[in-house]
Image (cartoon, rainbow, N blue to C red):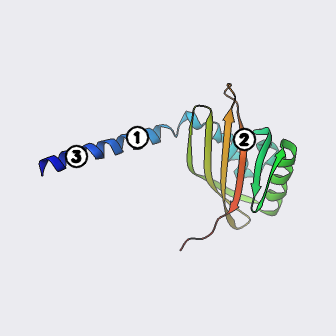
Amino acid sequence: MKKILCILLFIASLLAGGELRAQQLGGGEFAVFAPITKYLSQGDAAALSSWFADNLDVTVISSSRNCSKSQARQILRTFFEAYTPRSFQVTHKAGEANKKYLIGQLNAGGELFQVTIYATSAGSQTYKIQQLNISRQTAVY
């Protein structure tokens, strides 16, 4: 019985350490997403597009395409005109070295959307959005 208790305590300490590491990742390492989330919540397609790579994959609701920075800006502008953003909440962020991704919930136009962003940096600290996905969130009962 003592052996089982020791094993359980060991496993619990490992899990607690992993949770602490995940909390530490929430800080400066993901600061790149601070302005991006601000622009999403404001519906500012022009400011958000300054974070776009020259070419990126954009999926909005059910339309998906690889497009230029200016085309992506126009797609988002059209989306924000149809669905005025009210708020944006980050639900998950992760990454390693020069790759980061974020998942969040956008409340816009009276509907909820799941937003996924994948950004990379090429050697410098400047991250660029390579993929942006906005999909209608389905209710789970």
Q: How crowded is mark 1: few (under 14 residues within 10 Å), some or many (20 or more)?
A: few
Label 1 belongs to which residue? 20
Left-right relation of 16 to 130 = left
Residue projecting furthest to the left: 1
Asked whether the beta carbons under mark 3 and mark 2 sit within 8 Å of each other, the answer is no
Residue 36 location, quadrant: top right
Q: Residues within 10 Å of mark 2 (few under 14, many from 20)?
A: many
Q: Which of marks 2 and 1 is in front?
A: 2
Of the residues under marks 2 and 1, which one precedes in the sequence?
1
Q: Is mark 1 on a helix, strand or loop?
A: helix
Q: Distance between the residues labelled 3 and 1?
A: 20 Å
Left-right relation of 91 to 125 = left
Asked whether the beta carbons under mark 2 and mark 1 sit within 8 Å of each other, the answer is no
Give the answer, above or below, for where 75 lies relative to 47.
Answer: below
How many labels, in total? 3
**Residue 82: percent from the left, percent from the top?**
81, 63
Q: Nearer the viewer, mark 3 or mark 2?
A: 3
* Amino acid on which disc 3 is placed: Ile
Residue 129's disc number: 2
**Residue 5: percent from the left, percent from the top?**
18, 49
Q: Is mark 3 on a helix, strand or loop?
A: helix
Q: How far apart are marks 2 and 1 (CA)?
A: 28 Å
Of the residues under marks 3 and 2, which one precedes in the sequence?
3
Residue drawn at 69 percent across, 60 percent down: 135
Label 3 belongs to which residue? 7
